[in-house]
Image (cartoon, helix red, strand yellow):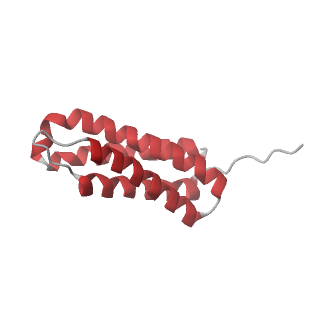
Amino acid sequence: MSKPVLGMLIGAVLGLIDGLSAYAYPGVASMMTGIIIGSTGKGLITGLATGFFANRLRSLPLGIACGLAIGFVLSLLVAATSPDPEGRYYYLEIILPGSLVGAIVGYACYRFGRPPRQTTA
């Protein structure tokens, strides 16, 4: 499986798990559908971008760092724009798992993804 496709698959699954983990916070029960869809979408985007960069970087530490950075930035954007109904922001609860998803996707893309084909002229 190519690295971007593998990244999207793993990112979507981990994003779904991340979204479902919000059930631990009773104050956000009315927003669960949006949280699950948003977390899954965030995982998809993180996986696609990380898989794309993993094809070009060809370095495990850089792949993990790239995934971590992409997950962090996307999670920060979500955390900064989505307060709960009482107006509270959940920075740590959104950014930490989002960054972790990015790091895991970066590792998986490098380790298990198919390298790009070399074309000869």
Q: Quadrant of residue 28?
A: top left
Left of 86 or right of it: where is 19?
Answer: right
Residue drawn where x is 78% and y is 48% of the image: 118
Residue 64 drawn at (x, y percent) = 50, 61
Residue drawn where x is 64% and y is 57% of the image: 57
Residue 61 drawn at (x, y percent) = 55, 66
Residue drawn where x is 55% and y is 59% of the image: 63
Left of 118 or right of it: where is 52?
Answer: left
Residue 31 drawn at (x, y percent) = 18, 35
In the image, residue 83 above or below residue 59: above
Residue 119 drawn at (x, y percent) = 81, 44
Q: Quarter of the image containing the C terminus?
A: top right
Residue at the far right in the pictured view? 121
In the image, residue 3 above or below residue 33: below
Q: Report how many numbered discs are placed on residues in the image.
A: 0
Residue 110 seen anywhere in this rendered image of the structure:
yes
Left of 69 or right of it: where is 28?
Answer: left
Residues 62 and 21: in front is 62
Q: Quadrant of residue 16?
A: top left
Left of 119 or right of it: where is 67?
Answer: left
Residue drawn where x is 65% and y is 59% of the image: 58
Residue 14 seen anywhere in this rendered image of the structure:
no
In the image, residue 64 above or below residue 88: below
Q: Quarter of the image containing the N terminus?
A: top right
